[in-house]
Amino acid sequence: GGDAGPETVFNLSGGLEGKKLELVFGDHIEELAKIALHIKKAGLNAANETQKRMMDEYAKSFGSGSLNAFKESQKLWVKDIGPTVETNIGFIETYRDPANVRAEWEGLVAMVNKERTQAFQKLVNAAPSMIPKLPWSQDFEKDKFSAPDFTSLEVLTFNGSGIPAGINIPNYDDIRQEIGFKNVSLGNVLSAKAPNEPIPFIHPRDLELYQANRDQAFEVQVGIHELLGHGTGKLLQETSPGKYNFDASKPPISPITNKPTTTYYKPGQTWSSVFGGISASYEECRAECVAMALSCDFSILQIFGLGNGSTDINNKAGDVLYAGYLSMARAGVAAVEFWDPKTRKWGQAHMQARFSILKTFLDAGEGFTVLDYTKDDLTDLTIKLDKEKILTVGRKVVEAYLQKLHVYKCSADYEEGKKLYEETTDVDEWWATKVRKEVLRRKTPRKVFVQANTIEKDGKVTLKEYEPTCEGMIQSWAERDV
């Protein structure tokens, strides 16, 4: 029973008086026993003592179901700084659970790209000077920025329902606050694209610039999103009865109301327990907004090898910035594919977030962002975004939205946060019927990643790669023999 203890049957009270609750264990016991065995064997080849202890905790968790052991493995993973080969495994992300509680199994093995990692390390070093540029006071920020490990990886294998472009884990707030976290950019996922893939909703006049700069724009977006998006913010907490991590007699002043905050996290409460089902998407939206705001700072763009740090919307750095804003707007349009008209609910956290940011662009006015079309059926729908207004109108409206998202999260103000996010992610009749129909008509096939295998023979390891075809993907899985 993992950490549950010997008791498995509990008598209920209140409205359920007379009923019993029984905890039943053993899901996937055969599969996880095999995994635990191989994890123990992997520990024999660990590069250091931290990795060996991490493998031991993995094996303990997968063999017994202990969540505490898994959390110990994640603490050790964070402490294993700068490995040449990076790996993590377990029940990690909760995106697919409507309650945002049950996590999905995934695992990755990847190698560090040392050249790109140097650029990300520069971003880590610059973080203490960048965080004060965000639209909130130090009261809503961690007392001290603990520089995380931030690496660019080339993925050997990633197993799960999807492969992300970046990772910021662990997802446990207590570990993030006390130990820290790791940021990972998956370089060969960022750059992977099918030949001649169509790019819906980008106007022909922008297509050449967009294609030339989108990969770099995505790298900037992912880097800032993971490090300064998910890595910022202080949750105002009553850590134990009568003890607070802020001055409860003089609470922080909200920049939204200019009055002291009145809400905070009570003992035992976490970010996900208070914000519930909206927490995953809400946090992705906050991180995306941090990236949209700070990518307007040309000193950050310089870290990625773009420009000399001086503000110039018409140079290469400005083109990458423009491609980044276009990419976010395009993703916001395409996002309605993941909204279900029957349940009127969103099915993908990141897409819900991007739709809300697009709506923020559109609501900015002043011609900043417009959906351009002449036909009633929207078959010629494209995005018109004014490049010259990104640094003024665009950044201003993004920061205003970000400020609310951030302060409501930090102060546990679920009521205001829920109200704000439901408003910005609401899909009206025009979006639901006309736009969504055109998005589905122009939908491009989901990417399928063909992954390599490693084969050991006579003490030597060789890499076997496969053709980028359906047959190649099937063969790669068949030869894993799992």
Image (tube, rainbow, N blue to C red):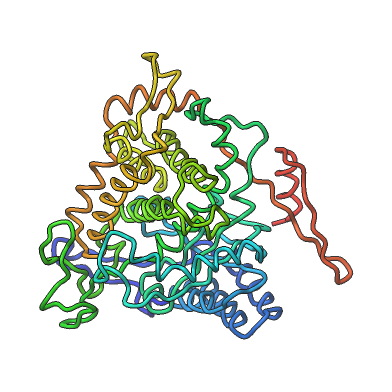
- Relative image position of residue 123 (x, y in whole percent): 50, 65
Decide which of 310, 460 is in the foreground and name it.
310
- Relative image position of residue 159 (x, y in whole percent): 60, 55
Would you say residue 2 is visible in this rendering?
no
Q: Residue at x 37, y 75 (%)?
A: 177
Q: Residue furthest bottom?
A: 49
Please tell me in which quadrant of the rendered image residue 52 appears: bottom right
Decide which of 460, 209 is in the foreground and name it.
209
Left-right relation of 133 to 106: left
The C terminus, quarter of image: bottom right
Q: Residue furthest top?
A: 375
Q: Tell me how many marks there are.
A: 0
The image shows residue 29, relative to residue 312, as above or below, that is below
Left-right relation of 47 to 198: right
Decide which of 89, 246 is in the foreground and name it.
246
Q: Residue furthest right?
A: 458
Q: Residue at x 66, y 69 (%)?
A: 85
The N terminus, quarter of image: bottom left
Please tell me in which quadrant of the rendered image residue 360 appears: top left
Would you say residue 393 is visible in this rendering?
yes
- Relative image position of residue 103 (x, y in whole percent): 44, 59
Decide which of 101, 448 is in the foreground and name it.
448
The image shows residue 316, relative to residue 238, as above or below, that is above
- Relative image position of residue 173 (x, y in whole percent): 36, 70
